[in-house]
């Protein structure tokens, strides 16, 4: 008896297509192994800016102060130069509302002191001129007096010489007269007359010598007086000159004090301008960390952050040290931004959807604190533009595009743990030419 269930379960005589499908799949697999595959490395990063001034900037208090007015709130967009908040002074040195005016008055007072010393310098200069003229006049008088005394001395010396000659003549006559008197040739009266004449000659000579000595003493006294005049006027001139230099020093000191006070005035005026914190550029105010009125800010304290509205976006990617030789300037990178859907075929980047092309412009030579190397990627102007809605700090997944190789080679490389191809192969002909050289 033939069972129907046996024929339905054991279909031995039915023709099967399994063998055909097996060879078809095998052939398709072999063909697939020879399809091109783009080698790549996966990297992560975030959106940043190419320029420092376009990155989020902290808002800091330039001076210590108390908040008295807010003009913005979190999320507000501001223009460059808009006032964000107003501060009031808290330091004792700057509480005077007329501080600038009083300091300017001090400047004017110092200028008056300087003018006084300048006038004093002019007066001492006139005194020096007058003393120099008086000294020259006095010295000229003494020179004339010495010249007169020298002339007088010359005359008196001539008289003395004549008296000496006369005395010698009288002495000879007296000696002859005495001899003649002793021999009895002349009378006593004649001898006494000759003796009187001799005594007169001696007296005349003595008087001439006294005159010469007196004149010489007068010349010496005049010379001493001349030296005394020089010393006296030198002391007076030195004293006035010292007063003049002292006044000039006071002028220089006043100039220094004036410059210092003027610097203070400028600083006070500049500080008054710092009571208003203004926006350094167009942007959005975020992360304000001070609330209310009356809070005190320290010098340089962080108030919040301003995010620029005009940004040349770039992507900061972080590369593992093992993959660092694979990335170089000009390297093509496919970027996938968080929040923007994408369908990615890592081996066929041209077939992916929702990805954006970029290129590496710089690779830092120093490792980052996270143990990775940072590189900067900018938009490729020749490819699809990056989405305008991306924001600073947005997460980015990147795929660095490397060489095109067959799939079988990529499988073989991964099985053996070999790195992707990044060695530059030198042309055989070029290498031979270089060798010949």
Image (cartoon, helix red, strand yellow):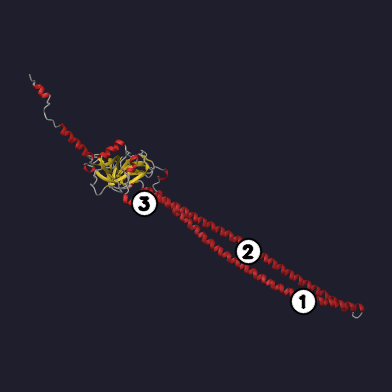
For the image, the number of numbered tags is: 3
Position of residue 160 in the picture relative to residue 84 (left or right): right
- The label nearer to you, 3 versus 2, is 3
Instruction: Provide the residue designation for mark 2.
Output: 230
- In x, y percent, where is residue 317? 31, 42
- Could you say whether the residue bearing mark 3 is in a helix, strand or loop? helix
**How much space separates mark 2 and mark 1, taking CA atoms?**
39 Å
Q: Tag 1 or tag 2, which sits nearer the N-term? A: 1
Up/down of 17 relative to 160, above or below: above
Neighbor class of circle 1 (other Cα within 10 Å; few <14, some 14-19, many 20+) is some
Q: Residue at the spot x=81%, y=73% of the render? A: 202
Task: Determine which residue is flagged by label 3.
Answer: 435
> Considering the numbered disc 1 on the image, is that residue within a helix, a strand or a loop?
helix
Residue 175 image position (x, y, % from top left): 86, 76
Of residues 179 and 61, the one drawn nearer to the viewer in this rendering: 61
Question: Can you tell which quarter of the image residue 151 is in?
Answer: bottom right
Residue at image point 31% right, 36% down? 416
Query: Whole-Å distance between the Cαs marked 1 and 3?
Result: 125 Å
Residue 233 image offset from top left, x and y in percent: 61, 62
């Amino acid at each position: 008896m033939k069972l129907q269930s046996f024929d339905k379960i054991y279909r031995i005589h039915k023709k099967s297509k399994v063998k055909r499908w097996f060879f078809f799949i095998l052939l398709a697999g072999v063909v697939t192994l020879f399809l091109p595959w783009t080698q790549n490395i996966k990297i992560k990063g975030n959106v940043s800016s190419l320029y420092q001034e376009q990155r989020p900037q902290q808002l800091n208090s330039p001076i210590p102060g108390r908040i008295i007015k807010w003009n913005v709130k979190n999320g507000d967009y501001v223009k460059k130069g808009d006032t964000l908040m107003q501060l009031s002074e808290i330091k004792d040195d700057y509480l005077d509302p007329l501080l600038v005016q009083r300091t300017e008055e001090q400047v004017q007072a110092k200028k008056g002191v300087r003018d006084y010393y300048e006038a004093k310098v002019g007066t001492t200069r006139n005194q020096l001129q007058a003393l120099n003229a008086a000294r020259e006049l006095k010295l000229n008088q003494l020179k004339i007096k010495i010249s007169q005394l020298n002339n007088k001395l010359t005359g008196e010396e001539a008289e003395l010489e004549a008296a000496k000659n006369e005395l010698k003549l009288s002495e000879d006559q007296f000696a002859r007269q005495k001899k003649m008197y002793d021999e009895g040739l002349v009378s006593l009266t004649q001898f006494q007359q000759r003796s009187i004449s001799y005594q007169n000659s001696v007296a005349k000579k003595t008087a001439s010598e006294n005159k010469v000595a007196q004149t010489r003493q007068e010349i010496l006294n005049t010379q001493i007086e001349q030296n005394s005049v020089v010393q006296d006027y030198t002391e007076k001139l030195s004293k006035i000159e010292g007063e003049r230099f002292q006044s000039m020093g006071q002028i220089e000191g006043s100039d220094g004090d004036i410059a210092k006070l003027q610097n203070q005035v400028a600083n006070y005026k500049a500080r008054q301008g710092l009571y208003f914190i203004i926006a350094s550029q167009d942007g959005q105010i975020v992360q304000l960390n001070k609330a209310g009125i009356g809070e005190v800010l320290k010098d340089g304290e962080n108030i919040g952050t301003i995010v620029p509205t005009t940004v040349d976006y770039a992507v900061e990617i972080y590369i593992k040290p093992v993959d660092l030789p694979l990335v170089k300037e000009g390297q093509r990178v496919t970027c996938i931004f968080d929040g923007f859907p994408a369908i990615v075929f890592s081996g066929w980047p041209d077939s992916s959807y929702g990805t954006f092309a970029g290129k590496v412009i710089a690779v830092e030579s120093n490792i980052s604190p996270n143990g990775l190397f940072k590189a900067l990627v900018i938009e490729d102007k020749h490819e699809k533009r990056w989405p305008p809605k991306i924001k600073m700090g947005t997460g980015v997944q990147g795929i660095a595009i490397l060489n095109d190789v067959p799939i079988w080679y990529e499988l073989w490389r991964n099985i053996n743990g070999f790195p992707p191809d990044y060695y530059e192969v030198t042309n055989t002909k070029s290498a031979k030419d270089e060798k010949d050289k």
